[in-house]
Image (tube, helix red, strand yellow):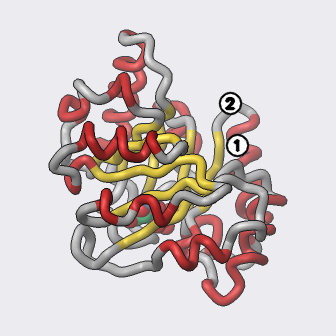
Amino acid sequence: MIQLAPSILSADFSRLGAHLAEAERGGAGLVHVDVMDGHFVPNISFGAAVMKCLEGQTKLPFDVHLMIEDPDKYLEDFVAGQTEYITVHQEACRHLDRTIEHIKSTGVKAGVALNPATPLNSLDAILPQVDLVLIMSVNPGFGGQKLIPYTLEKIKELKERRLAGSMAFKIEIDGGVNLENAGEAAKAGADIIVAGSSVFGKEDAEKQAKKFTDIFSKM
Ligand code: DX5
Ligand code: ZN
């Protein structure tokens, strides 16, 4: 089943709890938590303190996307009772294998993210060890951008590699997904679909989330 992971980056930070409850009622499966440090990406979002305030506000598991340099230094701060995945960027890790093992040692699932221009084969050696591969479909740093079409080809190819290697990691797409292209992203092979501005940018997050989950339930 394809899961919707609304990104709180586009939510109203003064009413995150209410917004999450809306997304949950709309059928979301995960909460996507976008952490930006102003170094790896040209924007600063929020840190672990904000994420921890969300514990208990929703039953949805947390899908933490660390867009930060030196993630080993901070990743344990993001291990909470509700954390399901912690994802780091291939481009931010000098010792990716060590970082993936570090995430797993905390008891949560480990993900790796690729920027649009980073080739899939940079992950060849690590794929059997990861629980999730996040394909960025925009250049990370901001919500509300337009999906870069060639990233859908990366998703298709990744799905083929997963099948060929009998692997079990989830494939996630992140950036620029809206109601018009969500079906295409799902068809390409994404198991988890992040949507920020298309869920929280509009008035009613529950209704918006429901429109996405309706699309996925028919697939
Ligand atoms: C981009 C973030 C995305 C983004 C998604 O750097 O990783 O999660 O906020 O937002 P939309 O859906 O608006 O592109
Ligand atoms: Zn993200």
Kindly identify the residue that appears in the image at 77 percent across and 64 percent down.
58
Q: Which residue is identified by label 2?
A: 219
User: Residue at coordinates 27% horizontally, 70% vertically from top-left?
Assistant: 41
Give the position of the N terminus as an image quadrant.
Answer: top right
Name which quarter of the figure residue 164 lies in.
Answer: top left
State how far apart marks 2 and 1 are (Cα). Answer: 7 Å
Q: Residues within 10 Å of mark 1 (few under 14, many from 20)?
A: some
If the image is split into quadrants, where does the C terminus sit?
A: top right
| Residue 179 seen in the figure | no
- Work out whether residue 35 or residue 140 is closer to the camera in this orientation and state it: 35
Describe residue 159's horizontal placement relative to residue 11 as left or right.
Answer: left
Q: Is mark 1 within 8 Å of ligand 1?
A: no
Instruction: Name the amino acid type tagged 1.
Output: Ile
State the SS at label 1. helix
In the image, farthest residue toward the right: 25
- Label 2: element kind: loop
In the depicted structure, whether residue 170 falls above or below residue 91: above
Q: In which quarter of the image is residue 152?
A: top left
Mark 2, Cα crowd under 10 Å, few <14 / some 14-19 / many 20+, is few
- Mark 2 vs 1: CB contact within 8 A: yes
Residue 217 at x, y = what percent? 75, 36
Q: In this view, does 148 lie to the left or right of 187?
A: left
| Residue denoted by label 1 | 215
Ligand 1 within 8 Å of disc 2? The answer is no
